[in-house]
């Protein structure tokens, strides 16, 4: 490291943020261990790390949600105390959370002034905000209709409102937590342009993400965290995704699982004219048609909320629908008593749901109880007509957990005590080991560590190679492109088009995801 | 995420501290009205646990609370709050009375199984309507079970006054049950073994049925498919639907079992003690069941212990009213404080205890 060079630069401009030896423990868990980091003014600084590496804890300390056990925070070279978020705002720190904190039925202006109204009357504050927002819009490509209600805005625009809120509060330092998770590639590009122009105006930006591509694309420097420690801070220009991944995980990882060409056979799943109307009367699926053949992975791409969840729920047996669905040539019921998950499983459909914590697992159940979940009526889990065979269930779970490398391989632990990746492995083990004809899998690697992603991708490819049909819904285009044998793109409850992964690219898929017919 | 506090602290320490706090405040109240709290406590312990006579009453009350506590606990596992134990036990009493008065029973050994079926069936029936309304129509079960308590009391009133009242009687109560339907008391059973125990006390063979029900509930909840599905549904309805567990069926089954357990209480108080059906025979035991289930963490062992505690409070409280100038109302205050601290204010104790353990872990 050019230590001397750095000291010289420090003399001219103090870093925007400097953390010195920050430590934070939750009970026996050391979430942050002796973290030191310098973020230079006017740069975009990425922070990467696996789930549980301590990124969120660190940012929560910076934003005043937690108090560090030890260490100090310097802003612009001056030591500061940040006991709460008000203090963070006063120190010039703005935070854009992964889940937006906006009042849905307020307008943009009302949301922006919320908490910083000047005086009892709203009018002057609103007028001032309108003026400031106009300036910001011109300066940073941050245009949003100030009078639109939040609920009428797209997710990308809602995010801009969050950024505007921070800037309106005079933030010099902007922290963004996984900002692109909910955006189309186009919207993400736009966000990056905004961030770049903010940087050029002297703002400092901290970007927390697990997408290495974004780090490489936009950041100036990147810090890698692993198990609560800061393992490296690197200049983005002098590193590579492979190096970052290796530092995050602590070993070499394959970012792309190798797979041979598919050997598709007969049609396993045929869907025709599938329609779903939700409780509010809104049509969520507007006539979906698709097929999945044995021995292939069909990737369903799309921005979250365009009907993919409903598609999985219908096929998994807990959402009513109209239309026609055939599995191995036979119709399956879409309404009535025989449209439930038990009947689906009996027909050879296994389902790894999108939201493993709300649907795929009972978080308070032990791992062994979860390993039988959905298959609890299977004869091998029954001792006799009255009682379940808890011992057999435990042994079965133990074996599955070992085969799927669940850590720790302790079947008696509650599901909630496992990390996200290991929870996902429990669900996958349960569903894949049933040897289904058709596997439905939603967001296979959402919130899963890089090391586990590699493992999960390998298993999905292995299932395909064993001649099974896989329908995979994912919002990660990289995942769609690297795993799928065919890709369909969903937008607003319709299929916008079908592409082959080697004849398309993120740009084209991104346009389809935004509803633009290419 | 690891567990926030060790299991023993959750199961033992928190309830014990809550209980201690309730007793301390009760002591202050007794002190405030000019009585000696220490003497009062001694009197309660002596009166409830100091003799086989006291135990005979304590166990009798505890038996009631075991049934209603188990009823609430089973529903809790399905995430259903059954406040209707009072009404279900009332109707269970009607079932027992109808069975006992239907035949000139030759021996209690024949009458008991039939009465058990009658009590369970009527209790379950009374729970079935709110359950169905919840499962099918989404009517909240807390509201409907409360309403069914009142309806149940009115139904009983009508039936006792207009149907079951013996001709010429002015009392809204059934005739006495036939002698062949009289259950052996624990005193009788002990005497058969040559032990002098609990003369003139109401504790009867139903106590053992209650213990059997504890085992039965434990087996159902943790060792059967139905229990597995009830627990899954209770923890996460979304996940249960994903797994193909039918929410309507599970709601119905859980509430039928719950109502049957509450109904079984009538074996103890109607058949075992009163030997006829009177108005308001349940005397609030249905509501005590809620506190018992909360304090017992919805586990049969916990329910058993909590039921014994409340049995002690009931009997000890009665002794207190008998031998001191402490007014009867104060006994209710003490019981209310115990319910308040062990049930409603559980988190008040739990959170400091959690902090304590966190602090110790961090150091």
Image: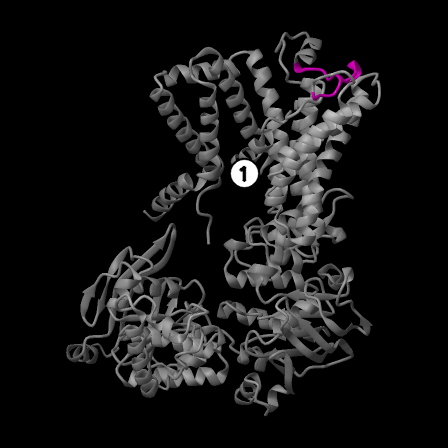
> Which type of secondary structure does the marked residue at label 1 adopt?
loop
Q: Can residue B215 be seen in this view?
A: no
Left or right, A432 with respect to A249, comes to: right
Tell me the quadrant of the picture where the N terminus of chain A can be found.
Answer: bottom left
> Image point 50% across, 67% down: which residue?
A447
* Most foreground residue, A334 or A185: A334
Chain under label 1? Answer: B
The image shows residue B115 at horizontal and vertical percentages of 76, 26
- Asked whether B289 falls inside the magenta stretch, the response is no
Left or right, A352 with respect to B159, comes to: left
* Most foreground residue, A213 or B150: B150
Magenta stretch in the rendered image: B172-186
The residue under label 1 is B297
> Image point 42% across, 41% down: which residue?
B350
What is the quadrant of residue A455 in the picture?
Answer: bottom right
* Most foreground residue, B66 or A17: B66
Q: Can residue A78 be seen in this view?
A: yes
- Asked whether B184 falls inside the magenta stretch, the response is yes
The image shows residue A291 at horizontal and vertical percentages of 73, 79
């Amino acid at each position: 490291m050019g230590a001397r060079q750095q000291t010289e630069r420090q003399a001219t401009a103090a870093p925007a943020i400097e953390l010195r030896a920050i430590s934070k423990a939750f009970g026996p868990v050391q979430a942050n261990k002796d973290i030191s980091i310098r973020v230079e003014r006017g740069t975009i600084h990425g922070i990467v790390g696996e789930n549980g590496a301590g990124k969120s804890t660190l940012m929560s300390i910076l934003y005043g949600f937690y108090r560090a056990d030890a260490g100090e925070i310097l802003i612009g070279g001056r030591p500061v105390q940040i006991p709460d978020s008000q203090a963070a705002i006063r120190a010039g720190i703005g935070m854009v959370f992964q889940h937006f904190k906006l009042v849905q039925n307020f307008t943009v202006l009302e949301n922006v002034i919320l908490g910083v109204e000047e005086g009892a009357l709203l009018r002057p504050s609103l007028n001032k905000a309108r003026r400031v927002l106009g300036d910001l819009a011109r300066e940073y490509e941050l245009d949003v209709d100030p009078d639109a209600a939040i609920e009428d805005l797209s997710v990308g625009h809602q995010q801009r409102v969050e950024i505007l809120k921070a800037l309106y509060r005079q933030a010099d330092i902007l922290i963004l937590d996984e900002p692109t998770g909910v955006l189309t590639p186009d919207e993400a590009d736009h966000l990056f342009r905004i961030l770049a122009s903010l940087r050029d105006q002297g703002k400092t930006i901290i970007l927390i993400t697990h997408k290495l591509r974004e780090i490489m694309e936009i950041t100036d420097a990147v810090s890698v965290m692993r198990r609560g420690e800061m393992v490296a801070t690197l200049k983005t220009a002098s590193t590579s995704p492979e190096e970052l991944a290796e530092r995050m995980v602590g070993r070499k990882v394959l970012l792309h699982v190798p797979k041979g060409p598919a050997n598709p056979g007969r049609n396993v799943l045929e869907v025709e004219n599938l329609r779903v109307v939700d409780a509010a009367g809104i049509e969520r699926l507007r006539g979906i048609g698709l097929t999945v053949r044995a021995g292939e992975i069909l990737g369903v791409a799309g921005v979250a909320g365009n009907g993919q969840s409903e598609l999985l729920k219908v096929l998994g047996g807990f959402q009513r629908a109209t239309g026609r669905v055939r599995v191995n040539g036979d119709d399956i019921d879409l309404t009535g008593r025989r449209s439930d998950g038990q009947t689906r499983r009996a027909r050879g459909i296994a389902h790894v749901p999108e939201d493993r914590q709300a649907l795929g697992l009972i978080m308070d159940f032990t791992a062994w109880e979860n390993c039988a979940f959905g298959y609890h009526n299977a004869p091998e889990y029954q001792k006799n007509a009255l009682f379940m065979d808890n011992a057999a269930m435990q042994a079965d779970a133990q074996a599955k957990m070992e085969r799927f490398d669940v850590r720790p391989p302790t079947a008696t632990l509650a599901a909630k005590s496992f990390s996200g990746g290991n929870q996902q492995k429990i669900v996958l083990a349960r569903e894949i080991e049933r040897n289904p004809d058709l596997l439905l899998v939603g967001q296979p690697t959402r919130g899963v560590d890089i090391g586990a992603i590699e493992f999960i991708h390998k298993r999905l490819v292995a299932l395909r190679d064993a001649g099974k049909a896989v329908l995979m819904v994912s919002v990660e285009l990289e995942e769609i492109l690297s795993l799928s044998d065919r890709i369909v793109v969903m937008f607003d409850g319709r299929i916008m088009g079908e592409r082959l992964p080697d004849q398309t690219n993120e740009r084209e898929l991104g346009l389809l995801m935004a509803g633009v017919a290419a | 995420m690891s567990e926030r506090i060790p299991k023993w602290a959750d199961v033992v320490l928190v309830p014990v501290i809550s209980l201690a706090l309730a007793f301390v405040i009760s002591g202050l109240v007794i002190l405030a009205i000019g009585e000696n709290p220490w003497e009062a406590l001694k009197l309660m312990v002596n009166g409830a646990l100091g003799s086989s006579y006291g135990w005979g009453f304590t166990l009798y009350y505890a038996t009631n609370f075991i049934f209603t506590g188990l009823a609430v606990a089973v529903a809790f596992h399905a995430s259903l709050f059954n406040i209707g134990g009072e009404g279900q036990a009332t109707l269970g009493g009607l079932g027992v009375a109808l069975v006992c008065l239907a035949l000139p029973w030759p021996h209690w050994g024949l009458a008991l199984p039939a009465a058990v079926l009658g009590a369970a069936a009527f209790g379950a029936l009374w729970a079935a309507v709110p359950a169905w309304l919840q499962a099918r129509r989404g009517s909240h079960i807390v509201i409907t079970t409360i309403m069914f308590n009142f309806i149940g009391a009115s139904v009983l009133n009508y039936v006792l006054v207009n149907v079951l009242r013996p001709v010429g009687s002015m009392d809204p109560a059934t005739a006495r049950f036939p002698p062949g339907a009289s259950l052996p008391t624990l005193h009788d059973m002990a005497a058969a073994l040559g032990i002098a125990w609990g003369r003139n006390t109401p504790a009867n063979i139903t106590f053992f049925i209650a213990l059997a029900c504890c085992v039965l509930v434990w087996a159902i909840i943790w060792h059967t498919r139905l229990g597995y599905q009830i627990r899954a549904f209770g923890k996460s309805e979304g996940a249960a639907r994903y797994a193909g567990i039918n929410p309507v069926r599970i709601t119905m089954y859980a509430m039928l079992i719950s109502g049957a357990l509450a109904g079984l209480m009538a074996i103890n108080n109607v058949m075992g003690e009163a030997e006829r059906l009177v108005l308001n025979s349940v005397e609030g035991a249905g509501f005590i069941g809620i506190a018992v289930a909360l304090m017992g963490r919805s586990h049969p062992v916990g329910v058993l212990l909590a039921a014994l505690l409340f049995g002690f409070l009931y009997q000890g409280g009665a002794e207190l009213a008998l031998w001191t100038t402490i007014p009867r109302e104060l006994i209710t205050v003490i019981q209310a404080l115990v319910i308040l601290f062990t049930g409603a204010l559980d988190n008040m104790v739990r959170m400091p205890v959690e902090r304590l353990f966190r602090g110790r872990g961090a150091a």
